[in-house]
Amino acid sequence: MTMLDKDLSYKLYSDEIIYRPPPESESILLQVAVGCSYSECTFCREQAHHRFKAYPLGEVEEKIAILASLPENKHKTELFFVGENCMVLPTQHLVAILQAVHELLPQVQHINMYARAVEILKKGRADLSLLRDLGVSSLYVGVESGSDRILENCRKGETVAQMLEALQLLDQLGLTYSLSSIIGLGGEELSWENATKTAEFYNQVHPWSIRLMTLSPEKGTTMAADIAAGRFHQLPPWKTILEERLLLEKLEVEDCLVYGNHFSNLLPLVAKWRQDQETVLEKMDEIICSLQPELVHSKDFDHM
């Protein structure tokens, strides 16, 4: 989107920084909610705010009208719902928004959003099918870790089994999904478990893309307090590379984009899996050996 004047930007978005996944860089960005309805994950900035708000339909319709008036949006066919957990909104509210999008932006064909696995399960087959038929195409789901122990420690509020069930339902309905997880979420003690269990989870599902981020808890979160108090031992930078390398070594998904270009990551990465797997691992080995040559003498990083 081109730069907007302050008055127009204020009408469209609640924050100066608009959070959206990398694949949505060219999408129309429609804010339908702010914050996360859950806001309990110990590592997340939203835990410090608890500011979830869903915008009334009238306000959302005003935003759609503004977006439809912008010349740069005339030919865009992708739209993204801004808000960290839009799937929690009542189905009829989402339906009304989708109908307004199609009325004012008739060229839009694909509408995407963030969703928690538990909200996908609550919607169920009938409501998800309805949303799909009205243009919802792809969901972005934060897996965070494939380890139930780590999910419980960070108060994710979901289990591996629930996430697997939700993604299998999306597969059955023909809804695509992109997943994300956090390097270092298990700390030093559970680094190996975080890498191997997360790769194991990914290998059971069929994501369109995977986004890898590195743990970087903000001030005011439980995780930040635990690190400061010595209750959680955060990985040093070179060990985050080891953990990421181990995850990628065991990752067996096919025809999947892997993004490791979040600002928190030490190494930038954008790759097609599994076509680029060998090349990526070789480059990571070179970097790892240059950082810690006395500690790394082979490609076996199973014991970190």
Image (cartoon, rainbow, N blue to C red):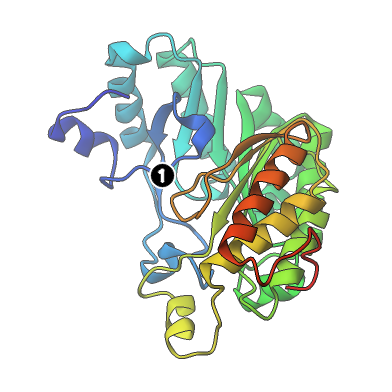
Eyeballing the image, is 61 above or below 127? above
- Count of labels in the image: 1
Residue 184 appears in the rendering: no
Closest to the observer, 264 or 13: 264
**Would residue 102 appear left or right of 251 to someone viewing this image?**
left
| Residue that label 1 marks | 19
Q: Quadrant of residue 278?
A: top right
Residue for point 41% across, 44% down: 19
Q: Secondary structure at mark 1?
A: loop
Can you give x and y, in whole percent of width and height, for residue 130 in the image? 68, 30
Location of the C terminus (image quadrant): bottom right
Q: Quadrant of residue 61?
A: top left
Eyeballing the image, is 182 above or below 79? below
Can you give x and y, in whole percent of width and height, for residue 276 in the image? 72, 34
Can you give x and y, in whole percent of width and height, for residue 34 in the image? 38, 50
Residue for point 32% across, 22% down: 67
**Would residue 77 appear left or right of 66 to someone viewing this image?**
right
**Would residue 127 appear left or right of 229 to someone viewing this image?**
right
Eyeballing the image, is 17 above or below 59? below
Residue for point 56% across, 62% down: 291
Q: Amino acid at mark 1?
A: Tyr
Location of the N terminus (image quadrant): top left
Residue for point 63% across, 78% down: 188
Residue 232 appears in the rendering: yes
Can you give x and y, in whole percent of width and height, for residue 179 in the image? 65, 46
Q: Residue furthest toward the front?
A: 294
Eyeballing the image, is 47 above or below 97? below
Q: Residues within 10 Å of mark 1 (few under 14, many from 20)?
A: few
